[in-house]
Image: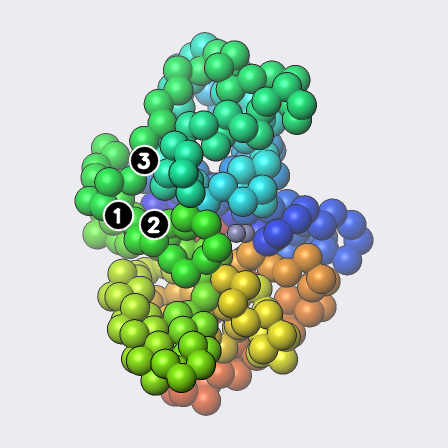
Amino acid sequence: MRVKFWGTRGSIATPGAATVTYGGNTSCVELRCGSDILIFDAGTGIRPLGLELMAEFAKEPVTVHLFISHTHWDHIQGFPFFTPAYSPLTTLHVYGSAGQGLPLEKVLRGQMQGDYFPVALGDIEATLHVHEFKGKPFAIGDATVDAMYLNHPGMTLGYRVEHGGKSFVYATDNEPYRHTLKHLGHRAEIGGNFGRDLDREFVKFIAGADFYIGEAQYTDAEYPARLGWGHSSISATVAVAIEAQVGTLAFFHHDPLHDDKAVAAMADTAHDLIKARGATLECFAAREGQVVEL
Ligand SMILES: [Zn+2]
Ligand SMILES: [Zn+2]
């Protein structure tokens, strides 16, 4: 498997001199499993990925599997600018969860309505198949893909891919339940216990992954003021990765308020936490353009 980060930013694109190292494009990760092309999220990073795919496949047919974590703007806003969608040689499979009351296809159609964008989803030239997650693992070529709902406003999926004896997890926009569910007034204890049970399910889902792309939007100092927003602190994400015994954690979905210096400082914090725990976890802050071979 080969991983390439095309967009590492959360919430909104943040181009500019202060973000050149870690990048300003929103969420998009490419995963090659042999010849199969999997893409996780269609944030603004999918635009340059689309251009590269057009160059690579020139006039050949290409099949792309696009996994949407959820349909907040930072995860879909690049989709209308994904050039392969406008080629009749492209077969595009889009996977994700149904929305809160609308099917996934209608939600995607929504951001391309005439008031927002000049081209409708129905007018793209690629052959489009939209698949809603049905709760069971499924195969793409030699790879197996599984998904799990995360703790985030809206319907949000994390994905796990197994291929060639290696495992990859993409799970962004997620907050540990134990922090949010213990704030239930007189039912705090029940909430805390329930939260811990749900958190254990997540640890099971990512357990033993060779490569885990997890989110860490906030520093530990920022997190208390953002409780319940559906994102993790750096220490929470490192703790989960250690508990699940993953090989490498690439932390991701960098906050728009964090410049390169701030993200580098979070990586230092992560390394200190790992050292203090005596753990063997490898960890880095994901950088736009970075390629990792598994
Ligand atoms: Zn997001
Ligand atoms: Zn979100």
* Helix, strand or loop status at disc 1: strand
Q: Position of residue 54 (x, y in %)?
A: 53, 21
For the residue marked with disc 1, what is the amino acid? Asp
* Helix, strand or loop status at disc 2: strand
Decide: few, some or many residues near mark 2? Use Cα within 10 Å; few <14, some 14-19, many ≥20.
many
> Who's the residue at 21% across and 37% down the image?
139
Question: In the drawing, does residue 268 fall left or right of residue 67?
Answer: right
> Who's the residue at 52% across and 12% down the image?
123
- What's the CA distance linking mark 3 and mark 2? 13 Å
Q: Which of 11 and 239 is in front in this view?
A: 11
Determine whether label 2 and label 1 are within 8 Å by CB: yes
For the residue marked with disc 2, what is the amino acid? Tyr
Determine whether label 3 and label 1 are within 8 Å by CB: no
Provide the residue designation for mark 2: 159
Disc number for residue 132 = 3
Q: Earlier in the sequence, mark 3 or mark 2?
A: 3
Visible residue check, residue 239: no
Q: Is residue 53 above or below residue 261?
A: above
Q: Of discs 3 and 2, which sits in the foreground?
A: 3
Q: Within the image, what quadrant is residue 274 found in? A: bottom left
Q: Which of marks 2 and 1 is nearer the N terminus?
A: 1
Decide: few, some or many residues near mark 3? Use Cα within 10 Å; few <14, some 14-19, many ≥20.
some
